[in-house]
Image: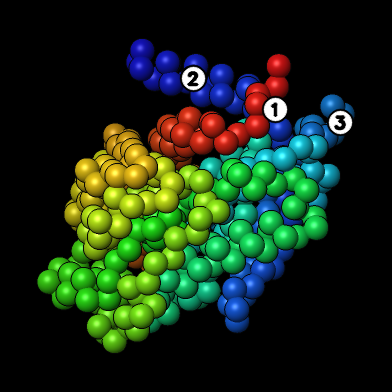
């Protein structure tokens, strides 16, 4: 009980210290022929009489997941802010970590999240999702597009660019700062252990991972503009080259839950082991007790489990909303503490 009260006090302090409210703007970007539709969430400072006028964000109204509130297309706050690209996991979308985007914006960051084609809600195709490098390239394309956009460039601190990803997006975040896998290693590993979480989506669909182009799969996708990265229970960690991890181009925080699924019926993804390969920059890991892989998704509505049961996916919302919210608050605090050097100074 004392621990819970302390956490509540700490999170209340964090919320009270937030100098900004959240605004959002829908926007479409491109990575070559890949159409990246999503949302830019950014700090705003509405007049006092309008501060309570935020409404549920139209981008994430859902019968399954709860949503954040936002000031749609409100004027951006004055100043320059970190730019953070938020990358979702397989089957996720631009709103999957809106709870985290909200907290980061409140602390003074601009956060962009899009739907990654071939790996997003309603368009999650194993054969396309297996082209892992495309999602990492999306991240770099977004940094370029937002940084050059007249609407945003005056508000971006180019020396404070970061990336955060969950699951497959967590791998993509690590790849964007130099983490590398090989086609041979990934294909061999999934042949040996096809039911592991990083492989099952592809192996169950009969994807021939050995047929992926090695030139793209094995390449280095380091983006030197990125100054920090956070991976939320990242996938593919067993296939990352230790030598590439020792040469990362930016510090990395890896936040992992205690289990992959409730009851630990499926093996852990293994992200906590990455710290052993720290090199040029530190790899910090944090394990949050009691959580699971899907607790990085939004809190669920009361009707969520019955809706998901029809597709055999009730496990996504197995965690009660209050418990998942507490998990979120712990992850938020860790993320904000990690990126504090790049955030604007707190208001007096």
Mark 2 residue crowding within 10 angstroms, few (<14) / some (14–19) / many (20+): some
The residue that appears at 54% across and 43% down in the rendered structure is 100
Q: Which mark is residue 98?
A: none
Image coordinates for residue 195, horizontal then vertical, percent = 19, 68
Q: Determine the residue positioned at 22% across, 76% down.
A: 184
Horizontally, is 115 left or right of 77 in the view? left
Question: Is residue 68 among what the camera can see?
Answer: no
Say which residue label 3 marks: 47
State which quadrant residue 183 falls in.
bottom left
Labels 1, 3: front one: 1
Mark 1 to mark 2: distance in Å?
Answer: 16 Å
Residue 130 sits in quarter: bottom left
Residue 321: give x, y in percent of width and height.
45, 40
Q: Quadrant of the N terminus?
A: top left
Instruction: Say whether disc 2 or disc 3 marks the residue closer to the N-terminus.
Output: 2
Q: Kindly identify which residue carries mark 1.
A: 19
Where residue 135 sits in the image (x, y, percent)? 47, 68
Picture quadrant where residue 128 is located: bottom left
């Amino acid at each position: 009980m004392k621990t819970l009260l302390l956490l509540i006090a700490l999170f209340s302090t964090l919320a009270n210290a937030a100098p900004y409210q959240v605004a959002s703007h829908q926007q479409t970007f491109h990575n070559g022929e890949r159409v990246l539709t999503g949302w830019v969430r950014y700090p705003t400072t509405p007049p006092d009489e309008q501060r309570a006028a935020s409404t549920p964000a139209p981008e994430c109204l859902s019968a399954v997941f709860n949503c954040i509130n936002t000031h749609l297309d409100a004027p951006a706050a004055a100043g320059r802010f970190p730019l953070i690209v938020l990358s979702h996991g397989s089957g996720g979308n631009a709103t999957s970590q809106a709870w985290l985007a909200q907290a980061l914006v409140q602390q003074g960051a601009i956060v962009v999240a899009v739907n990654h084609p071939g790996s997003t809600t309603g368009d999650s195709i194993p054969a396309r999702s297996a082209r892992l490098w495309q999602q990492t390239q999306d991240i770099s394309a977004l940094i370029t597009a937002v940084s050059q956009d007249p609407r945003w460039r005056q508000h971006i601190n180019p020396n404070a660019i970061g990336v955060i990803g969950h699951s497959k997006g967590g791998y993509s975040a690590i790849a964007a700062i130099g983490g590398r896998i090989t086609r041979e290693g990934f294909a061999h590993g999934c042949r040996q252990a096809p039911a592991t979480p990083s492989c099952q989506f592809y192996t169950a669909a009969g994807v021939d991972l050995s047929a992926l182009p090695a030139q793209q799969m094995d390449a280095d996708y380091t983006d030197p503009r990125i100054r920090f990265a956070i991976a939320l229970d990242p996938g593919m960690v067993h296939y990352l080259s230790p030598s590439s991890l020792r040469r990362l181009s930016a510090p990395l925080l890896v936040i992992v839950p205690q289990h992959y699924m409730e009851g630990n019926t499926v093996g852990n993804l293994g992200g906590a082991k990455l710290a052993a390969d720290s090199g040029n920059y530190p790899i910090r890991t944090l394990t949050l007790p009691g959580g699971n892989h899907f607790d990085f998704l939004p809190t669920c509505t009361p009707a969520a489990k019955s809706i998901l049961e029809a597709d055999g996916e009730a496990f996504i919302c197995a965690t009660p909303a209050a418990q998942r919210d507490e998990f979120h608050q712990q992850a938020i605090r860790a993320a904000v503490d990690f990126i504090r050097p790049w955030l604007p100074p707190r208001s007096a």
